[in-house]
Amino acid sequence: MEGDMFPGLGDGTQIDNKVMQSFQKSFGQVQNILDQNRLLINEINQNHESKLPDNLSRNVGLIRELNNNIRRVVDLYAVLSSNFTKSVDASSEGDSSGGALRSDGNKSGGGHKRGRPVFYFFELSNEVKKRKM
């Protein structure tokens, strides 16, 4: 079924549909915020070019909104990265060392945690973008 396997991982790690849908939802939220930022930047530029006092004072609020949106995007990416790492680690640990996963997602039975290169996260991002096109 589509979304059961994420081909960008290259090592056959399975990511279930629920996890993939969660990532897609988060990337959708990020994209919506970035679209809002584009509109805010355009309005800020127009207000700046007009040099009208009311428009310039309005820019103060618009710039605050833009900064808050940027913080939200950073937070969303941080959560996405953390969730993705946990998902991949839980999946690979469940497949490789034979111990049971505890409810906290950690391995019982002495399995060691393998680090994942950052590029896996970006490959997932690219895969989600491709599916939207």
Image (cartoon, rainbow, N blue to C red):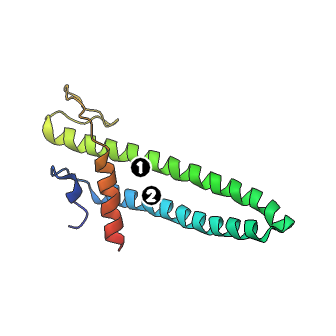
- Classify mark 1: helix, strand or loop: helix
Q: Residue furthest top?
A: 110
In the rendered image, which residue does mark 2 sit on? 26
What residue would you read off at disc 1? 80
Q: Residue at x 75, y 61 (%)?
A: 59
Q: CA distance from mark 1 to mark 2?
A: 7 Å
Residue at point 35%, 58% (across, down): 125
Residue drawn at x 14%, y 34% as measured from the top left: 97
Which amino acid, by three-letter code, is at mark 1?
Leu
Q: Earlier in the sequence, mark 1 or mark 2?
A: 2
- The vertical placement of 69 against 118, above or below, is below
Q: Nearer the viewer, residue 118 or 7?
A: 118
Check if mark 1's residue and mark 2's residue have beta carbons within 8 Å: yes
- Figure label count: 2
Of 16 and 54, which appears nearest the observer? 54
Mark 1 neighbour density, 10 Å: few (under 14) some (14–19) many (20 or more): some
User: Residue 36: x percent and y percent?
Assistant: 59, 66
Q: Give residue 11's position: percent from left, percent from top.
A: 15, 49
